[in-house]
Image (cartoon, rainbow, N blue to C red):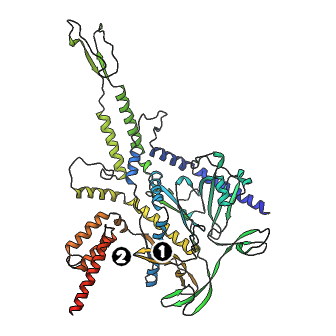
Amino acid sequence: MTQSTQQTARLSYFSSLYEKSKNAARGDLALFDRHMQQYRGSAEIDGSTQKAGTVRNITYEMIESQVSSHIPPPKVDPTAYSEQKVRLAQSVERLLVAVREKLPYEQMNDLDERFCYIYGGSVWFVEWDSSAGIGNKLGGVKLHCLSPKSFIAQPGVRAVEDMDYCFLRFDTTKAELVRKYGVSPDRLSLASREYDSEAYEGDADEGATVILCFYRDADGKIGEYAFSGELTLTDIPDYYARKRRFCTVCQSEEQNCLCEHPQFSLESQSEERIRIHALPGGVSAVAPAHGAEEDISIPYYTPRRFPIVIRKNTSLEGSLFGASDCEAIRPQQQAINKIESRILQKLLRAGVTPVVPEDATITLNNSVFGQMIKMKPGESAAQYGKVDTTPDISQDIAEATRLYDHAKRILGISDALVGISGTQPESGYARQLQISQATGRLESKRKMKYTAYAELDRLIFEYHLAFADEPRRISYRDAYGRLHNATFNRYDFIAPDEKSGAFYYDDDYLFSVDLNGGIEAQREQLWEKNLENLKSGALGDPTHPATLLRYWQCQERAHYPYARENVEYFQSALRDEISQKEVIA
């Protein structure tokens, strides 16, 4: 089989696999579209061709009331305690914090929150971008938060880790295909755009849909295949393998090739040569310094999972994603739309009809105070009157309110959470307690978010073990808010096997989120607690400079205004006090 025939066969295979998977997902894709229309305030009425006259969008209100800007801080623990593994776990935590500071996590979290509540889940795609380096740092992680409509799963499989293959689809331009994938301009006509994928704003002839397939081969290795229409973009059987780009003519690296007509190819590399030396408490794979030096071969670290993480809203049996909030309150939304439309119709048809004698000479119109009525001699005002046809809508309003309360109870949302004041006066503590109770009912959704972020953190760590050859300089703040420099080096994670003595990359760490990290966002409460601790003597004698120094160090960590100046003042006062005691002694 020639290379061209083989490429055609693979394109045909993946295209047919994609079409089969997309056909199986048509029901879910249609449901996703319905959820988004409901969130945007659709006037469609189920089972009717007549649209609602008005929409009270309680779906939008309740979803937006749950959206949180909080990004849970990472937490990494070793599975078995040792001083070295604790230090390495702290190094991973600092790396993850540094990655979050550099990537637009706030923007992606904003998308993620809405995707999750509207559709029942969201999709995160993690990739290593070798061009993301700055200076002597080569490569970095890129994250994409995607709508579930961009993810096509293997039919019948409800967990990403159990899939043999899955698809991601992106709308882009044909010009981007040339830049990113090196497609020849004369072959762009083979690319196509799917009209049922995410809308592309622009000339339809200039748009293209990229279908990205991740699959497992017979050996369990992850492969990548990308195409658009009848155009193959990439075909990488071993997605995570290290690649060496070399010239097939002279067999030299791309940067060293001097051929007039080079032909470049990619070759996977399975091992690397490193120099290690023994140190107390472990080994180090840095440049030799002291100790017994030795050159060894060690397999490159290879991630073993798809580069995709799915966050669920709440778990739903038999579903890849979770339960959608739109689906949960759709009956109430539909009923409220009908009732609000009925109220509007009643009010539009209502009015005050005047009653006048048959021989009245006045002209009636709809203007207010636009005319005068002059009585004839001997005529009585009792001959004039009105018929008020204003309907009673109190029952309609009561039913709409009842349905609104139903929807809130279904999602576990209280008046306090959506910002509505109660009818009864209550203290600030009671108000805070209501919010806490409402948040407790939404705890399962937060747990799903924490689980997804922990999986993302593990993937980011694994990518750095696999591809970050250069040490990464990172910074962190200590317990007193001081900024320090640190380094993440993947070679620090090389460890010898206890039985065979062979070296390998140790990735045996537990990933979660720091549940106490969110309190730092509530600065005013922290300031008050720190002041209470000072007054109560929990930090020591409130009049002693050492206690005051500790108090202002806590306030500095909580970002209290001008706390840094007070820390420096009491540090100086404490040094002066110690100096005076030494002089007296």
| Residue highlighted by disc 2 | 479
- Kindly identify the residue that appears in the image at 37 percent across and 27 percent down: 348
Instruction: Please identify the quarter of the rendering in which residue 512 is found.
Output: bottom left
Amino acid tagged 1 = Ile
- Tag 2 near tag 1, CB within 8 Å: no
Dot 2: what SS? Answer: loop
Instruction: Please identify the quarter of the rendering in which residue 9 is found.
Output: bottom right
Q: Nearer the viewer, residue 260 or 517?
A: 260
Badge 2: residue crowd in 10 Å (few <14, some 14–19, many ≥20): few
The quadrant in which the C terminus is found is bottom left
- Against 346, residue 212 (above or below) is below
15 relative to 154 in the view: left or right: right
Badge 1: residue crowd in 10 Å (few <14, some 14–19, many ≥20): some
| Residue highlighted by disc 1 | 474
**Residue 450 x/y as whole percent:** 43, 64
Q: Nearer the viewer, residue 120 or 261?
A: 261
The quadrant in which the N terminus is found is bottom right
**Residue 106 x/y as whole percent:** 45, 60
